[in-house]
Image: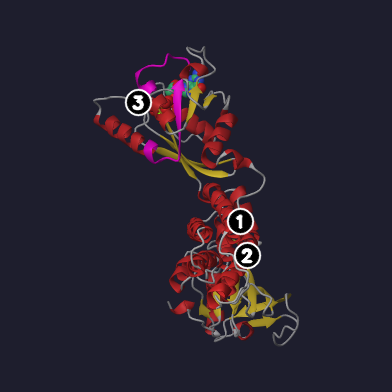
Amino acid sequence: MPWLANDTDTIAAIATPRGVGGIGVIRVSGSGALACVQAAFRPSRRATYAPTRSHAITHGHLLAPSTGAVIDEALVSYYREPRTYTGEQMLEVAVHGGPVVLDEALAAVCEAGARIANPGEFTQRAFLNGRMDLAQAEAVADIIHAKTRHARRAATAQLDGALSRRLGSLRETLLDLLVEVEAHIDFPEDDLGFEPSEAVAAAIGAVATGVSELVAEGARGRYVRDGIDVAIVGKPNVGKSSLLNALLKDDRAIVAATPGTTRDVVEGHVDMCGVPVRLADTAGMRDTDDEIEREGVARSRRRAESADVIVGVLDMSRPVEGEDREILALVAGRSGILAANKADLAPAWRPEETMAGSVVVVSATRGDGLPDLVAAIAAAAAGPDSQSAEPPAVTNARHVEALRHAEESLGHAQRTASEALPPELIAVDLRGALNALGLILGDTASEDVLERIFSQFCIGK
Ligand SMILES: Nc1nc2c(ncn2[C@@H]2O[C@H](COP(=O)(O)OP(=O)(O)OP(=O)(O)O)[C@@H](O)[C@H]2O)c(=O)[nH]1
Ligand SMILES: [Mg+2]
């Protein structure tokens, strides 16, 4: 992994999306960044480009260094190290936003000595130069990839250091505890007042509580960041496809009065109270001799099994019968949601009669009850506080895993301390917990972990 080596190359990349736009930006970072841009840039008002102030913008033209041919008009921003994104000398060259002009602009800067950056290399340098910790670096990618406003808010808070501060204070308490415990290992004959018992166990317990709170937030956060799979299931003709279309506000699935219309899984994406949802309409479940429909029903069952939340649909205008009971059992077994559809027609039964926990009365064609259904889905996915104002501090599965390790080590340490076992044993677990927290912030993360994280970033970030 050559790029994780502490290299001092000057790197450059197109930082704006490929395609056409008002402007496009080339980013350059490294000790030779200014020299590379100087070789390709002719300012309008001076003979040479020699910025004296940081964060200043200069107008001019970008040229191909070898031929002197003008590529485009350009605005160049200069950022003096170390107060830059990467912590290194940085420049940004803004030209018109077309793929050809951007390729030529990048080639000009590279001709002058820069090399093309790897994905995430700017952020990786920011991390290696101490401009941000690993959790903050990951938040940068999360902001870019956020699927909903709620996810974006969670990522912005993480970049701002909300998670890092909480982890930092837990870590500080742990370090103090470790020093106390280790002092007793080193000088057992001294009476340092160490009580490897209740007091230490309680102090460890307090940290464990803080970690557990973060783990709990992570359960909600996974949904905020990655979203959930929701399957709409029911017998034929109850209005599943109509419901999908109504929730997506799009004419996605074919709707027809003929039972057995939908044969395959039809999907769409929608934001439900800040939770990104992948919604799947499925073939109506029934016994059938039709080979294609049978395969459709098998797919429906598989999708229902793998979904995070299932929405069972019943037709309120018709008596509950045969396959409806199977759907009711499925919903009850998975704590799913029951949608009693066609509420605009004369009802054949009342919602209370289904004995299902979460029943929402809806009309897919008229739109009645849809906001309630959306709220019920979001709540089923992310718990009752899914719509709380505060975004969860933890949204990343990697962070949750590390927090779980920390939680486990602290549980051990707490037991060891309360049983008055040797302090060496407590220290081992305290170090384990510290190591796990360090994985999130990046100081104990191995090179291959770092490489994996940064390689998932886009080029130019
Ligand atoms: N009155 C009324 N009719 C509805 C409602 N929802 C769906 N329908 C009608 O019910 C029929 C079946 O609707 P679909 O959405 O195709 O039902 P489905 O469950 O997807 O059916 P399959 O794909 O065959 O399993 C169509 O004629 C719809 O117009 C509703 O809320 N009220
Ligand atoms: Mg259908």
Residue 20 in view, yes or no: no
Q: Amino acid at mark 2?
A: Thr
Image quadrant where residue 234 sits: top left
Q: Amino acid at mark 1?
A: Ala
Crowd tier of the residue under label 3, counting other residues whose Cα lies within 10 Å: few below 14, some 14–19, many 20 or above: some
Report whether the residue tagged 1 is closer than 8 Å to ligand 1: no
> In the rendered structure, which disc, 3 or 2, sits on the residue that comes first in sequence?
2
Q: Is residue 441 magenta?
A: no
Report whether the residue tagged 3 is closer than 8 Å to ligand 1: yes
Find residue 166 and report its horizontal and vertical position in percent. Answer: 63, 60
Highlighted magenta segment, given as a residue range? 304-326
Identify the residue position indicated by label 3 in the image: 260
Q: Nearer the viewer, residue 193 or 383?
A: 193
Per the rendering, the mark at residue 206 is 1
Crowd tier of the residue under label 1, counting other residues whose Cα lies within 10 Å: few below 14, some 14–19, many 20 or above: some
- Number of the front mark, 3 or 2: 2
Crowd tier of the residue under label 2, counting other residues whose Cα lies within 10 Å: few below 14, some 14–19, many 20 or above: some
| Disc 2 and disc 1 in contact, CB within 8 angstroms | yes
> In the rendered structure, which disc, 1 or 3, sits on the residue that comes first in sequence?
1
Q: Is residue 293 left or right of residue 109?
A: left
Identify the residue position indicated by label 2 in the image: 173
> In the rendered structure, which disc, 2 or 1, sits on the residue that comes first in sequence?
2
Find residue 406 and report its horizontal and vertical position in percent. Answer: 51, 60
Q: Nearer the viewer, residue 93 or 397?
A: 397
Q: Residue at x 52, y 25 (%)?
A: 359
